[in-house]
Amino acid sequence: MKWIKPWKMILVATMTLSVLSACSSQTKDSAGSSSQTSSKEENKTSDATPEPLGKYADTVTVTEVLGYNPPEDPRTPKGITPEQNAYLKDLKDMLNIEVKYKWTVPSSQFEQKFSLAMASADLPDIMELDPKNFEKLKKQGMLADLTKAYNDYASPELKKYMESDGGFAMKTYSDDGKQLAMPAFEDPFLSTQLLWLRKDWLDNLKLQPPKTMDELDKVAEAFTKNDPNQNGKNDTYGVALQKNLFFWGYDLRGFFNGFGAYPSDGNNQTAWIKDSGGKLIPGLIQPEVKTALGKLQSWYKDGILDKEFALKDDTKTVEDIVAGKVGIVYGEWWYPNFPLNNSVDKDPKADWIAIQIPGLDGPGKSLVPKIRSGKAFAVNKSMKHPEAAIKMLNYYIEVGKKKYQGKTEAKDGFVYNWFNPRIYNPASIDTIYTEVNKALDAKQTEITLDDENFKDVEKVFQARNDYFSGNTQTGSKGVNWGLYFSRAAKDGGWGTTRKIKEAGAYVNNEFYGLPTETQVEKGAQLDKLMQESFTKIIMGASLDEFDKFVQSWKSLGGDQVTQEVNDWYSKQAEK
């Protein structure tokens, strides 16, 4: 039996009682409700001794907005909506915090919708912010100071996560001694771009995994024209792509990296690399980008890219991957967890593998940030209970993620990526990989790890065993394969990523500060210019349009951004 910290034992007992007992407290919508006398001893939260997971006497209502993708796990009940997420029900039962959404939209629509919300000052209590929006709201004085709430209410585990990088990310989101957001930062190598492709299609066509861009060109053409699925129909294309060229997934970061081009970090941010003189230059406007666009243009003309890519969002691209219409996609370590697991379930022959991205003369080098912190969670300054945000983070780590030592299940309606705010252990993926392989190498039949990662490691270990034994009682073939191949297989997502890290086959994005003044002011305009210019070129416009784009980008604010980024870089060198 695992040892449980005393305060957690008390928490579990209290939460179990609260679920079983009828609550006589009257629910109120106001976040500023005062304590009631009924159920006083059970529900009281003392200001003198703040508890990381203390239950409010009166309901604290928290407003949020959400951009979401379909549930990753196919065992999730059909038709469930974000409002029905079981995490929210448990949050209400255990902490008496009720989440109400002002609106929810698919992830591809979130940025536009949130921009409108900021423009109309119609903001929720708790907000997930990218660096640009954080800077905007900080300057407008719209963000609450979370310093006291964090110091008083953060659980030991949350503090451990936040201090795992020496407190660097926390300092990045502070201003004048005030903690204005809680950054969600992770291992930077989680951003490493891999090439995922159908090995069964390679085998059908007697082809080898490509190591160079020329070899990839031949494979992509064969996947388009040579009936790789052997069904006698012309119903496949080579490389997956959605309308957002640089996004969180199913985009072209890895493709450009293969040409030695580093235009973007995937978070709508230009990537910055060192030149020969030690200055930072924007990867977006370098000649290698033009060369890569030329190849994309030829791929589009030859049907290797879907002719309708400019109209497809990430959801539509995922549908093509799962339906077996496309056999190559660039992306990160987690793809087997979604959507490749669904591809495997739909087509038992589907055999996806991960390789280092092809380059011009051999395997290429992926862009890797120095700090991976693409989002942060902030609180509206008008929120009466800012500490509720900290408690919700504690809840996700201590309860939501573990659920009485780890029993949150998709079949019961728990959808982890529909819950905000959430922060992960920055070292969790590498711990899972190391511990599962340690157990396999020792020929263990069960996991005996005794720390906070136990349940995550056990879950992946069991999924691996179920996959190889064909046991589908607790998960489908795709689910079991996806958990194992993403996190623990030596030739899988994280296993391949680790090899790339160990080989030094990466290039750092040297800029890791918050957006500069001109990036905040002009960033959206410059991003739109890039998206429109690159899409036109891919679809057949003259390659000379790239040179025009460079001049426009520089004159519309790019040159000023470059100066500001280098001013920041000089200050880092002085520290």
Image (tube, rainbow, N blue to C red):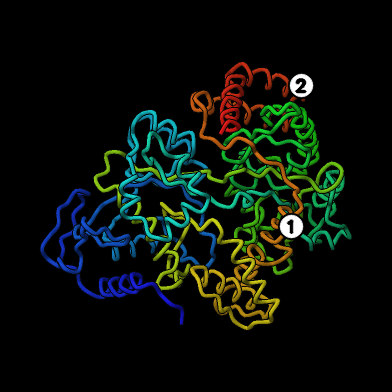
- Characterize the local packing of mark 2: few (<14), some (14-19) or many (20 or more) Cα atoms within 10 angstroms: few
Picture quadrant of residue 494: bottom right
* Position in image of residue 196 (x %, y %): 72, 55
Vertical position of residue 82 compared to residue 283: above or below: below
The residue pinned by badge 1 equals 499
Q: Secondary structure at mark 2?
A: helix
Q: Quadrant of residue 17?
A: bottom left
Give the SS element for disc 1.
helix
54 with respect to 477 (left or right): left
Pair 2/1: label in front: 1
- The residue tagged 2 is 544
x 48%, y 65%: residue: 76
The answer to whether residue 200 shows anywhere in this view is: yes
Q: Residue furthest front?
A: 574
- Under mark 2, the amino acid is Asp
Q: Nearer the viewer, residue 289 or 411?
A: 289
The residue that appears at 52% across and 28% down in the rendered structure is 516
Image side of residue 285 versus residue 426, left or right: right
Please indicate whether residue 95 sits to the left or right of residue 80 in the image.
left
> First in sequence: mark 2 or mark 1?
1
Horizontal and vertical percent for residue 252? 69, 42
Which residue extends farthest left? 37
Q: Measuring 75% from the left and 49% from the top, which residue is drawn there?
A: 504
Measured in 3D between alpha carbons, the distance from the residue under mark 2 to the one under mark 1, in whole angstroms, is: 38 Å
Residue count near mark 1 (Cα–Cα under 10 Å), binned few <14, some 14–19, many ≥20: some
Where is residue 235? Give x, y as percent. 75, 52
Q: Is residue 481 above or below residue 146?
A: below
Residue nearest the viewer, comparing 249 with 3: 3
Q: Amino acid at mark 1?
A: Lys
